[in-house]
Amino acid sequence: MTETTHPVDEILPPPKLFALGLQHVLVMYAGAVAVPLIVGRALKLDPADVAFLISADLFVCGIATLIQSLGATQWFGIKLPVMMGVTFAAVGPMVAMANANGGPEGARAIFGAIIGAGLISMLIAPLVSRMLKFFPPVVTGTIILVIGVSLMRIGINWIFGNPVGPTAPMIVDPAAAEWMKAASEAAAAGALPEMPPKLAAAATMPNPAYAPLGNIAVSAVVLAAILLIARFAKGFIANISVLLGIVLGCIIAVSIGAMGFEKVAAAAPFALIMPFHFGMPVFDPVLIVTMVLVMIVVMIESTGMFLALGDLTGKTVDQPMLSAGLRTDGLGTLIGGIFNTFPYTSFSQNVGLVGVTGIKSRFVCVAGGIILILLGLSPKMGALVESVPTMVLGGAGLVMFGMVAATGVRILAGVNFAANRNNLFIVAVSLGFGMIPLIAPNFKMWMPHALHPLIESGILLASIAAVALNAFFNGASGSAADAKAAAAVAEH
């Protein structure tokens, strides 16, 4: 690397690029395949079509990652170490669309809305990027802290199980479930019976599939391995501590029968991803507007991710860079709709991995993008990565997601709380807003359903609160004292 080459633009040797890129892919894989699984099942598609959605998703993840990290002209790509994946912000609206109209017809309506939203997002990206002046250190640090804390829920659920679904902490007793069904029918007829006391006492029971000690033990071993490698290893081995920890976890999972390769053996070695697999999209104006609102949320969240990466890599994110990054969110979404997949954004869990490894080169993510394309074109390779149990990823998740939160704390260290005590209000209240969806996920149950996509993201709520409170207390760009304090921290 020459003296004039920024670490972001450093090109590492191919073996290192492959290992570090694979590490990024393993970190994001579980989140990348979750959305096509959810939407495919909501559409009631055949298993073969759901598998196709997963392959298409990985394929477009790779393409969007290449554009974002490598760059394509001055208009597309922020040229930072960014991994692109499907945003969870769009799941709610897409499931609602699927419930209204399932099967291939519902898929065509969803993909039409996604294509329309992608086009509009590319047009409005420069407008959204002009909001950069509203993100001084007190706002940026708070948002990144909320991002990290919000992500911790994912890592914890990887270890213990999801709070809803087949791995929820409690399960409904079958007899109680039958009574509830009969009571629902009776209530429709105007008569609501009272549940028998014995049945009420046993209505729920602990779920043996939730938080098994074996899962916790595997996650603990992975976490311990990552920390030991990071502490005692040197150079490249230390940089791939997360990857080595996951590999060790997989070996343990195979030895105890928690990971198998049956799906790998059954999967095809190669399959093309064809556009418009379900037919020509249907462009419904109402659905397009709904998806555009989701994309605005996505772009605001992406702004926080890009600023976090800029801080981690030492690369200042200016307005043209931010505009190119947000425009790529729209382009990735457009490509996604064409290739039968969903809206795209930068994956926040990979931001934490940059902090863990200290590797700032964007070409690591370029390698990750190429790996994702190969996974999408080879169902057998995709099945191999998909077979990694979430309990293995859980131990790594605690490290990476905590690193995002720690980055937010580091940025807040440059904020002058002594001279400007109003900054305490900004952080305190914004953090509280960000915790609402985590602590009380049903807070929106009586609000209009159209508002749900806009308020179910704690990151968005914290962003709005932080920007508004900063404008109220400090003006749009923050105080001069904060700017001097942040510059002093940067120098040290």
Image: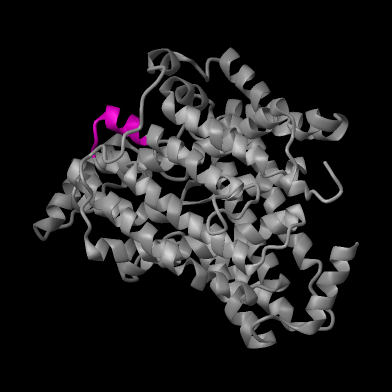
The residue range painted magenta reads 44-53
Q: Quadrant of the C terminus?
A: bottom right
- 62, 254: nearer the viewer: 62
The percent position of residue 360, horizontal first and vertical second, equals: 73, 46
Compared across the picture, whether 369 is left or right of 272 comes to: right
Residue at the limit of the structure toward the left, as seen here:
189
The percent position of residue 113, horizontal first and vertical second, equals: 29, 56
Q: Is residue 258 magenta?
A: no
Compared across the picture, whether 97 is left or right of 254 comes to: left
In the rendered image, the vertical position of residue 466 relative to residue 442, given as above or below: below
Q: How many marks?
A: 0
The percent position of residue 81, horizontal first and vertical second, equals: 65, 47
Residue located at (76% from left, 64% from top): 411
Q: Quadrant of the N terminus?
A: top right
Compared across the picture, whether 448 is left or right of 413 comes to: left
- 55, 65: nearer the viewer: 65
Q: Is residue 114 visible?
A: yes
In the rendered image, the vertical position of residue 325 relative to residue 446, given as above or below: above
Residue located at (33% from left, 45% from top): 338
- 304, 38: nearer the viewer: 304
Compared across the picture, whether 389 is left or right of 167 comes to: right
Q: Is residue 51 magenta?
A: yes
**Coloration mode:** one colour
Q: Is residue 198 visible?
A: no
In the rendered image, the vertical position of residue 483 relative to residue 291, given as above or below: below
